[in-house]
Image: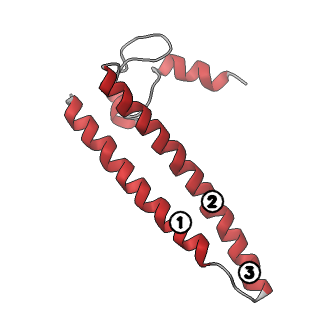
Amino acid sequence: MKSQKDRRSQLTSRMEYLESKLREIDDELDSHNSPDWEELAVERETDEVLEGMGISGLEEIRAITAALERMDAGEYGYCVSCGERISEERLDVLPYTPFCPVCAAEKSKAP
């Protein structure tokens, strides 16, 4: 069983990694300005992939920030929907998850 301090360290490290990757993505996107039409088309395709990665990274950073806020409030490790304790096994896989497996499944079914 990981301590709250260990979880916080894990989340903080992941957020720092993501922020670093986002800076790299921004730098890469800013560097694309080829005058050659064919190269520009390839760069645009690459940009779409990088932008998708950036969006995913931002979403994960938001989830980590929310998890850290729940820690500060003493609510970390409990489902925000039903209030049940989230298992250690689930937190090992998704340390920033706000939902127990039952509520997460229900949320994924919703349109």
Q: Position of residue 22 (x, y in %)?
A: 49, 60
Horizontal arrangement in the rendering, residue 64 relative to residue 12 (left or right): right
The residue under label 2 is 51
Residue 43: percent from left, percent from top: 68, 76
Q: Amino acid at mark 2?
A: Glu
Residue 32, percent across and down? 64, 78
Mark 3 or mark 1: whose residue is earlier in sequence? 1
- Image height check: is 81 above or below 34? above
Estimate how packed mark 3 is, as few (under 14), some (14 to 19) or many (20 or more) residues with alpha carbons within 10 Å. Answer: some
- Under mark 3, the amino acid is Leu
* Residue 68 visible in the snapshot: yes
Determine the image quadrant of residue 9: top left
Compared to residue 73, the image places residue 97 above or below, namely below
Relative to 101, is 34 on the left or the right?
right
Q: Nearer the viewer, residue 4 or 69?
A: 69
Q: Horizontal placement of 4 versus 75: left or right? A: left
Q: Which residue lies at the image location 74% right of the left edge and 88% below the top edge?
A: 35
Q: CA distance from mark 3 to mark 1?
A: 17 Å
Query: How far apart, in angstroms, are the residues tagged by discs 3 and 2?
Result: 16 Å
Q: Amino acid at mark 1?
A: Ile
Q: Count residues near mark 1 (Cα–Cα under 10 Å), then give few for <14, some for 14-19, many for 20+.
A: some
Image quadrant occupied by the C terminus: top right
Answer whether labels 3 and 2 touch (C-beta < 8 Å). Answer: no
- The residue carrying mark 1 is 25
Dot label at residue 40: 3
What residue do we see at 48% from left, 43% from top? 60
Residue at x-position 54% and y-position 66%: 26
User: Mark 1: which secondary structure?
Assistant: helix
**Mark 1 and 2 residues: CB-CB less than 8 Å, in contact?**
yes
